[in-house]
Amino acid sequence: MDDHAAIKLIPVSFTEIQGWAQDDHAAAFGALRRSCRKRPTSNQACQDVLELGETVDRETARRFFETHYVPHRVEAEEPGLVTGYYEPEVMRSRARDDAFQVPVYKRPDDLVQVTPDELRAFYNASFSVGRRKGDELVPYYTRAEIDNGALSGKGLELLYLDDPVELFFMQIQGSGRVRFPDGSWTRIGYAGKNGHSYTSIGKLLAERGEKPPGGLTMEGLKGWLRADPARGKALMHANKSYIFFHELPDTEQGDGPVGAQGVALTPGRSLAVDAIYHKLGTPVFVSAPQAPTPDGKPFRRLMIAQDVGSAIRGQERGDIFWGSGTEAGAIAGVTKTQARFYVLLPKP
């Protein structure tokens, strides 16, 4: 747990956690190993993770967690909530042409980070990012200003795509696996945001009493936005937040999208959390039996806090990374359910 926010944790035993014994602890161990490689001396548990090596069976992994950690139930005033996110796979072009007109921008040089980006959920409504205007630091351009050309001609175009709706949702996910017309591909990841508050367009539609034909799911919202481009553009501009990307280096291309901790995310085992409450790299057992899963079994899994998000705010609030591609997106788009968190803290 981090020191900059109070959180109520109640020690419990592993036997009190429903689903603990049935989980695949080796899968969580593999995700934890990635975090420990990033910060190998953060605690004794991490040092022992690396000493155990690459191949650990389920029983060994379970004994490791039970030996090195003490589970704590999160006691929050609001019921816990988990949603889902994924890595979209989309067609792109490196050059602008008749088919690909929508730019994907790199992080601008004039973007000034005012508060820690890792805590962007906490500072979501604050002045967290600015730009220099003479001797003054002013708010960065909004989504509408950027869409209307505020960054044009500055050499920031990383790629181009053919659909502004796909860019909008890729920005919400924070990463993308990009395929080019010649069959080659690359990964792009989060490089920064413009500092404006994230606003849920689904929530806005609900407040207006509007419901897309496909419901307030990701696919339903995409359909609503595309049905009337002018109306869709206006709604997207209501979310002033804008994400910038960078292309992952060749050494990181094959491992998966990279989260806020700087490690590749593991499908079904990486969790985005509010870093004001939870230190990245912390194991968190998530009990969300109503969450959709590929095998239809209740979601009760040990996960590793490895990412953050502007909309992920609260002691018992998480975002489950489901993986890459269409199937992962289908699950992520309908994941929204109550959850119980058990945080595993290292023994002294």
Image (cartoon, rainbow, N blue to C red):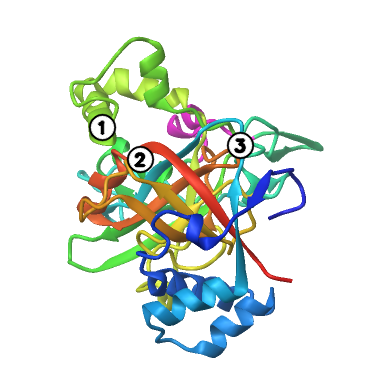
Measure the C-alpha gap from mark 1 to mark 2: 8 Å
Q: In this view, does 256 lie above or below 192?
A: below
SS state under label 3: loop
Residue at mark 2: 169
What amino acid is at disc 1? Lys
What's under tag 3, amino acid-wise?
Ala
Q: Quadrant of the C terminus?
A: bottom right
Label 3: how many Cα within 10 Å (few below 14, some 14–19, many 20+)? some
Tell which circle, 3 or 1, labels the residue nearer the N-terminal end: 3
Side of 297 relative to 54 (left or right): left
Which residue is pictured at 34% across the width and 10% down the height? 209
Nearer the observer, 150 or 33: 33
Q: Are marks 2 and 3 in contact (CB under 8 Å)?
A: no
Graded by Cα atoms within 10 Å as few (under 14), some (14 to 19) or many (20 or more), the crowding at tag 1 reads some
Q: Residue 76 carries which label?
A: 3
Return the x and y of residue 205 as percentages of the image width and height: 36, 17
- Circle 1 sits in a helix, a strand or a loop, which is it? helix
Image location of residue 79, percent across then percent down: 51, 33
Find out whether the residues at labels 1 and 2 contact each other: C-beta distance under 8 Å: yes
- Pointer 3 with pointer 1, Cβ within 8 A: no
Residue extent of the magenta highlight: 140-151
Between marks 2 and 3 in the image, the one whose residue lies nearer the viewer: 3
Precedes in sequence: disc 2 or disc 3: 3
Q: For this rendering, which residue is in front, 126 or 286?
A: 286
**In this rendering, would 287 be left or right of 96?**
right
Q: Distance between the residues labelled 2 and 3?
A: 30 Å
Q: Residue 222's quadrant in the figure?
A: top left
Mark 3 and mark 1: Cα distance apart in space = 33 Å
Judging by the rendered image, the residue that carries numbered circle 1 is 222
Comparing 205 with 238, the one in front is 205
